[in-house]
Image (spheres, rainbow, N blue to C red):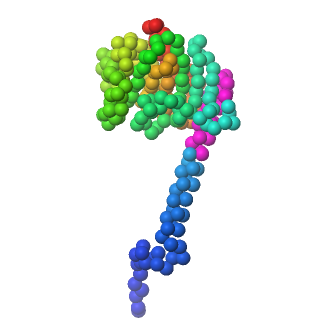
Amino acid sequence: MSSITPSFQTPSAILAVSPYSGSDIAWFIGMGAFLITALVSMLRKERRRKNLSNLAERLGFQLQNPGAKIRLVSVEGRHRGHEVRFLSYFALLYAYYVFIGDKRRSNIAVAVSYAGRDGFCLYLYPNIASLRRVVTMRTKQAQLLVVKTGDDAFDRAYFVLSNDPVLGQSVLTPKIRGQLLALDTEVQCRSNLAIEDGTVIYPLLGAFRNVAQVSTDTITSMLDFVCGLAEQIEKHP
């Protein structure tokens, strides 16, 4: 009985008999990668749009520019006397500081405005060594200083920078710290947070990738937390 020996061809041998040149194949591969990337981006934008619509319906807020590009779509309303906006955080100018290093985000942030205390800024990150090094390097020129609250559990969990550490300690009250730790447990992900330009910016993480699965109580608790933080800042004109 004769045996059949399989024939193996090198990539160069395959290209030699292929009707397509190497540049043609590279073009097809590149185009395929481009189309896949475009499809993933489109699906992510559609998810953000659905999340924003869901928030507007459940909170009784107004959905602004629903047919526009996702960066122009927002949900606006008031909570505890504060102007509240949900929006795709790619529309936020402060994403440079806020959203470094966490891939479990939902691509939506809530922004709450507050009155007074011009120029104050504070940035809070998960206290991860690699992230802490990157943030520290990127903020040296902004003259930001590390804020320690004296709460060991909180200081182990978060790395905080501010241009006014004394005020930073004052606004991060025990109640605010406890609310943030509780929210992070609910959404199963430690959050980033930024305060600047008269606005508190809080990204929706973890479970908020699908807002329809998040209880209204959790969303309300999150709004209470962000508005409470804004009110703490307003106590220090």
The answer to whether 234 appears left or right of 5 in the picture is right
Please indicate whether residue 176 sits to the left or right of residue 47 in the image. left
Decide whether residue 56 is among the magenta residues.
Answer: yes
Note whether residue 128 is visible: no
Q: What residue occupies the far right of the structure in this picture?
A: 67
Q: Is the residue 149 above or below the residue 36 in the image?
A: above
Based on the picture, tell me whether residue 46 belongs to the magenta stretch.
yes
Residue 75: percent from left, percent from top: 63, 27
The spot of residue 139 in percent (x, y) is 36, 28
Which residue appears at 45% of the width and 39% of the height?
A: 103
Outermost residue on the bottom side: it is 1
The answer to whether residue 20 is seen in the rendering is yes
Q: In this view, does 151 lie above or below 25?
A: above
The magenta segment is: 42-64
Residue at image coords 49%, 64%: 26
Residue 130 placement (x, y as % from top left): 32, 36
Query: Relative to 165, is 88 on the left or the right?
Result: right
Q: Residue at x 65, y 27 (%)?
A: 56
- Quadrant occupied by the N terminus: bottom left
The residue sitting at 54% across, 54% down in the picture is 34
Q: Which of 3 and 235 is in front in this view?
A: 235
Classify residue 146 by image quadrant.
Answer: top left
